[in-house]
């Protein structure tokens, strides 16, 4: 339904988006994820027709809407856009805001569309209210159905939950995804929140410096990152030096399987906090508990190296439930292989 082929967008000498290519299937929800300034919103604006590409092309349902030869005006692209600040018109009622994006013909032939959408988001009784009379969550839902009202082929969401209180965000996010899935609409959503992308997306496009770093399912990006940047973007990691010794990667916390690096090559091992194992004795590096913080379903444990232990100043572990180790306790620290990633320096894994 949406296709980007080598899309580039420049602002003067600055390349905001550089050769970006990916597609979004009909009815799929794809998240554009990445740090601030990586080109996510610029990509969305180029798809919507608010920015002119410097190269490449954008297609909607097989129709090229932007390339080197020209650009289709935004209203003719069949795309809905939910802005980060909702952009509701303060002088229009809720019903008038929802109907705003519909053509005159649509309003005449699809007379029950606005009422139906407002009932779907449980705001039918607020049709005559004005935006300032609504809560932030209600405004967000009105902005969403306004984008859906013209029956677009695809909807673009630009950080739609970033302005909401944390207490509202999770519930509204779940409700929004349900509404979009029920409508069968194709969705491309921008977010900088890895957790939000993991729980909402069918697929994720992780961006960095205007380029796609890795594209795939949430499980693939979290469990099989292609480089250290991707692994670290989805949460805290412990970084350990490693050395290739035959079929193994030697680290101060034990050996890991060698995924294909040359013997003697220095590598970097990234381990998620829940990938460290702690025991009172047995194999693993001798370390000492420096701090324990209870975090509800888990405990965060700060570990320091004992005298003569490998050169890790501090490591961080996440253990389920309440930690049975106290500050000052000696422990043996090992690695859960399923939560450890090996990369060559900082350039990524071997081909």
Image (cartoon, grey):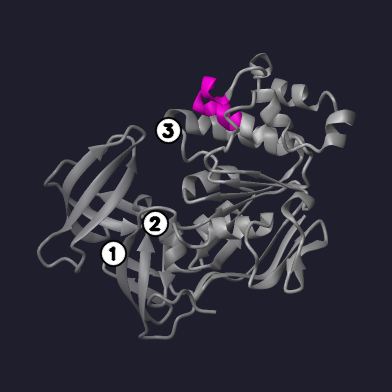
Residue 5: which quarter of the image? bottom right
Give the alpha-carbon distance from disc 2 to disc 1, as whole Å.
Answer: 10 Å
Give the magenta range: 131-141
Quarter of the picture containing the N terminus is bottom right
Q: Residue at x 45, y 81 (%)?
A: 261
Residue that badge 3 annotates? 166
SS at circle 2: loop
Residue linked to disc 1: 253
Which residue bears the numbered disc 2? 336
* Label 1 residue SS: loop
Q: Position of residue 30 (x, y in %)?
A: 64, 51
Q: Residue 267 falls in which quadrant of the image?
A: bottom left
How many numbered circles does the render carry?
3
The image shows residue 139, relative to residue 234, as above or below, that is above
| Camera-nearest residue between 67 and 30 | 67
Q: Is residue 128 left or right of residue 305?
A: right
Q: Is residue 139 magenta?
A: yes
Q: Please give the name of the residue rendered at 70% of the width and 27% of the height, measured from the top-left corner.
A: 96
């Amino acid at each position: 339904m949406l296709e980007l082929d080598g899309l580039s967008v420049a602002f003067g000498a600055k390349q905001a988006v550089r050769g970006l290519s990916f597609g979004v299937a009909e009815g799929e929800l794809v998240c554009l994820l990445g740090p601030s300034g990586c080109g996510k919103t610029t990509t969305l604006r180029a798809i919507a027709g608010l920015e002119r590409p410097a190269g490449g092309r954008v297609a909607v349902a097989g129709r090229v809407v932007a390339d080197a030869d020209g650009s289709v005006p935004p209203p003719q692209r069949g795309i809905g856009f939910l802005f980060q600040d909702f952009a509701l018109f303060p002088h229009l009622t809720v019903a008038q805001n929802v109907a705003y994006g519909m053509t005159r013909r649509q309003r005449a032939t699809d007379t029950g569309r606005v009422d139906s959408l407002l009932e779907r988001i449980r705001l039918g009784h607020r049709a005559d209210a004005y935006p300032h009379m609504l809560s932030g969550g209600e405004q967000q839902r009105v902005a969403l159905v306004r984008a859906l009202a013209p029956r677009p082929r695809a909807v673009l969401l630009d950080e739609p939950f970033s302005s909401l209180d944390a207490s509202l965000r999770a519930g509204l996010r779940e409700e929004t995804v349900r509404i979009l899935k029920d409508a069968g609409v194709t969705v491309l959503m921008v977010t900088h929140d890895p957790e939000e992308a993991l729980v909402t997306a069918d697929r994720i496009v992780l961006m960095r410096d205007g380029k796609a770093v890795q594209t795939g399912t949430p499980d693939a990006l979290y469990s099989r990152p292609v480089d250290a940047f991707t692994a670290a973007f989805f949460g805290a990691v412990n970084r350990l030096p490693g050395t290739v010794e035959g079929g193994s990667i030697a680290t101060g916390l034990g050996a890991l399987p060698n995924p294909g690096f040359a013997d003697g090559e220095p590598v970097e091992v990234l381990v998620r906090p829940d990938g460290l194992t702690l025991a009172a004795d047995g194999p693993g590096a001798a370390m000492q508990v420096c701090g324990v913080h209870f975090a509800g379903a888990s405990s965060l444990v700060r570990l320091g190296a004992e005298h003569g232990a490998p050169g890790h100043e501090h490591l961080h572990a996440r253990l389920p439930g309440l930690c049975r180790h106290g500050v000052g306790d000696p422990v043996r620290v090992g690695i859960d292989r399923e939560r450890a990633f090996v990369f060559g320096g900082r350039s990524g894994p071997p081909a």
